[in-house]
Amino acid sequence: MPVFKAPLRDMRFVLDDVFQAEQLWARLPALSEHVSRDVVDAILEEAAKINENLIFPLNRSGDEEGAQFNAGEVTTPKGFKEAFREYGDGGWIGLGADPRWGGAGMPKMVTVMTEEILFAANPSFALYPLLGIGAALAMAHHAGDELNERYLPKIYSGEWSGTMCLTEPHAGTDLGIIKTKAVPEADGSYSITGTKIFITGGEHDLASNIVHLVLAKLPDAPAGSKGISLFLVPKFLVNEDGSVGERNPVSAGNIEHKMGIKASATCVMNFDGAKGWLVGEINQGLAAMFVMMNYERLSMGLQGIGASEVAYQNAAQYAKDRMQGRSGTGAKQPEKAADSILVHPDVRRMLLNVRAHNEAGRCFAMYVSKYLDLAKYSEDEAEKAAAADRVALMTPVAKAFLTDKAFEACVEAQQVFGGHGFIREWGMEQLVRDTRIAQIYEGTNGVQAMDLVGRKLVRNRGAYVYEYLDEVRALIAQTQSTPELATFAKATADAVERIAEVTAWITDAAARNADEVNAAAVDFLHAFGLLTYAHMWLMMAQASVDKNDGFYQDKLVVARFFFSRMLPQLYSRVDSINAGSDVLMELQPASF
């Protein structure tokens, strides 16, 4: 049976040693009075307890039982309903929410840690509260007070839940061609008709009401994405006193049978003249929904880190316990019939690949969270704007690079087990299956790469990228004269210059041939992602140098592994970009 312990020591290292979060909170008036290390320590300890003891034990049984569909009703696996109630009652859904709506007002730098723990414990379960948080966030930004007062407190308490309804059978990435219609009614509401697919948590038995955020078009809407509006459509209408009223004509037509996250109900949703209310402005629905989408995209990165953390913990323990063969340099455990497989360099290679990703990815998620908090809470308008730009640049990286590397990490951890990794009882095969979806939903990773290169690089001629590179150069300047860090700083500096060069190459090439953007996208995302990992490892090494504690010394060892064995992959990605798009477009369609 797999095991999981929340990596609290590493989380505190990132929060305190690397980012010195308490100093940041102290200078932000919106956070200074209620966010402290004592409060955050208590939150982390309790998050570890509820996830390790209540939610993680439901992960395997939930996968085996799955969500069940019967005549429009969905039943979640045994234990999920009780766990969801306890999770809501504990205030976890509203942890980062505005106290106005019953939340605790914690910054993203705190909730990024609790979300990782939740995803590590049980990704299927995690999706139910997190979709509600995302829906509530979009509402808080764009809905009026009347809707928010009616719905947000009950979403944050866990009494109700939420969804996002975008995709249709014929319209995935190209939302401009959706067919769902919204017809104005005399009472100010709208009649919503259409079919949505792949709706996470569209129907279930965990909450007494489900609040759907639905993209639809008015009869006179402009063509394409400029004609999309956003509507709130509850499963049950809400009475004036806030109680649940009659059933709205919205229902699940089926649930999907999936490769992984089987305990999460992925629904086909039918809206048959359902009553809904406009959220935000007419024809501005996509912008409103992207508040939620961008939140979910960082969460998908956290899903990946959580899974690869569990994979590492189990693979490392297995490698210590599994006795097979002898070390090439002589027996290390001569009193036994064989050495543990941890003596073999290739096993260590796999484990260090996973660990180096986990620790850099966790640091990167905190880095993005810091800028999310600055964009939200800073009182300096220039700082807010710069932070928002950094978030825009890093969101597709947080979603796509973290989940690509996490899937690779889960596969490598599975490989450490050999044949046992393919067997159900060890838990590795479920981690691989569950993590695969993180590369697909909330915008596939190829689409994320296109967003990074097309919108965040080419459209502004690399300005976002160059601003980030200047930040990394500043860290290099701080560290290059420290003997223990000089090699790391030099490797990071070389990577910065290659990214600067290829950014200019893509900008110029795209002006000549639009296909160069798409052709370069995934390779650039991975090259850029590796640079962000170098940045994170340089910061973590800087925070660890001159400290005798074994924890910090281990950080420096893993940093050396990253810079010598993983960062060089950046250069092959750049070489692929420089090869151009012609070789991709040369083969004629009939030849495929």
Image: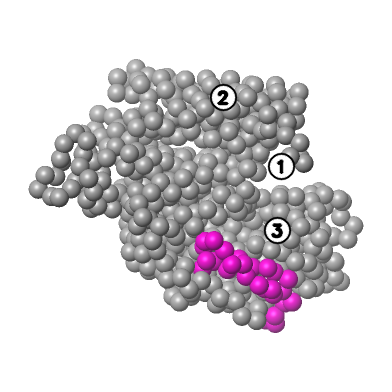
Q: Quadrant of residue 480?
A: top left
- Position in image of residue 22 (x %, y %): 39, 43
In magenta, the rendered stretch is 245-270
- Position in image of residue 334 (x %, y %): 11, 44
Q: Earlier in the sequence, mark 2 or mark 1?
A: 2
* Residue at 85 percent of width and 66 percent of height: 183
Q: Is residue 202 visible?
A: no
Whether the magenta-drawn stretch holds residue 261 is answered as yes
- Position in image of residue 249 (x %, y %): 74, 77
Residue with the most extreme top position:
481
- Position in image of residue 195 (x %, y %): 75, 66
Q: Amino acid at mark 3?
A: Leu
- The residue labelled by disc 2 is 575
- The residue labelled by disc 3 is 166
* Residue at 60 percent of width and 37 percent of height: 522
- The residue labelled by disc 1 is 592
Q: Quadrant of the C terminus?
A: top right
Q: Earlier in the sequence, mark 1 or mark 3?
A: 3
Which element is circle 1 on? loop
Q: CA distance from mark 2 to mark 3?
A: 37 Å
Residue 201 shown left or right of residue 224 in the figure: left
